[in-house]
Image (cartoon, grey):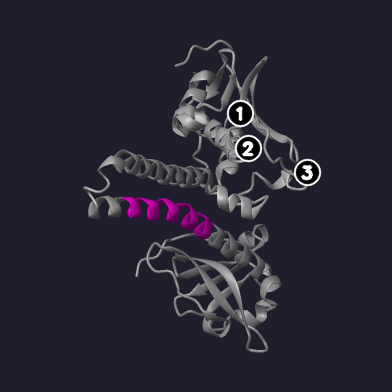
Amino acid sequence: MTHVRIDLDFDALSRWVSDGIAFVGLDEVVTAWSSGACAITGIQPSAAVGRPLDKIFARVEPALGLAVVPQPIELWSNDERRRVLGATILSVDGGWLLSFGRESQFAAIEQLKNEIVAAVSHELKTPIATIKAFATTMRHNPDALANDRGDFLATIEEQADRLARAVEDLLLVGRVDAKHLLSTRETVALDRLIDEAAARLGPTLAARIERRSTGLGVSGDPELLGAALYHLIENALKFSPDGAPVAVEGEGNGGSVAVHVRDSGIGIGKEHIPYIFERFYRVDRNLTATAGGSGLGLTIVREIAQAHGGTVAVESTPSAGTTVTLVLPVRDARAGGT
């Protein structure tokens, strides 16, 4: 078994970390127990140190080699009932370093994981089922559907694009979590970004966009800025009446450009506005389930704005419409597009 050699100042570590921290020797006996571990478990250091790990926790899988292992662990309680904690176990020289949080922290992680699985499953399941159904129908009825072949292939292509967008969203969220969002910066024309967003939406939805841009340019990563505009426009179209236009207007203001995306849709109640940029937050779950989407679009917009040193804000009136304003830095107010 290989271990990482780390010089640990356990007392200093336990003072700076509020989570529970324990050091366990190779014989799986606890040799150090932090004040955070005491607060979370109710077990005093004098009762934990020198005690076999399996007498404190009912289920722990020690880390092997160079692994850092996140896992749920079960804590024995006085009444034999088990409490589940979220833990990370690191293999270090001479044993294992065990870090664990409260039940509420673990429950929050589990809830987020379940929400991610549910949202991704919902967003992927429908296009996969549609593609499968149309492809199977075409294969088994090649002659009867000769006149419908173009429509069937267009539907398959549309659903494949939907799958691709869902995957792109998940990859962007992964970059957000890793704090590796902004990797390049250049001056790019706002008109170009709107054109690219419209192209992704398709001709039917693009025809509803009323552009009021004036040749402004913004500074940043073109791919990310395009993703932010796409999500804002797509979201506005999704929650507007069928056929209703969505206005996209650029407004220069010194060192920044404000992009206003206005719709005449269902609007958002004031009580929801502080939360709509959180992952998977649903203003109306029945409506969003029908409209589709991963539930990550506005989260991605917020993170892209912040990565560029910008902001995003919402003004809305129920039943009257919503305006989302994305403010971005600008280097050349008359950029032609690079």
Residue 325 vs 40, above or below: the answer is above
Q: Which mark is residue 270?
A: 3
Residue 131 is covered by the magenta coloring: yes
Res 240 label: 2
**In this view of the protein, can residue 184 be seen by the observer?**
no
Q: Position of residue 287 (x, y in %)?
A: 62, 50
- Quarter holding residue 38: bottom right
Place of residue 338 in the rendered image (x, y in percent of width and height, measured from the top left): 44, 16
User: What's the residue at 67%, 79% (across, down)?
Assistant: 43
Residue 102 coordinates in the image, percent (x, y): 65, 68
Q: Nearer the viewer, residue 235 or 207?
A: 207
**Marks 1,2: beta carbons within 8 A:** yes
Residue 258 left/right relative to 292:
right
Q: Amino acid at mark 2?
A: Ser
Q: Which residues are magenta?
A: 116-134
Disc 1 versus disc 3: distance between alpha carbons?
A: 23 Å
Q: From the viewer's perspective, is 116 left or right of 76?
A: left
Q: CA distance from mark 3 to mark 2?
A: 18 Å
Q: Is residue 286 above or below residue 33?
A: above
Q: Which residue is mark 1?
A: 245
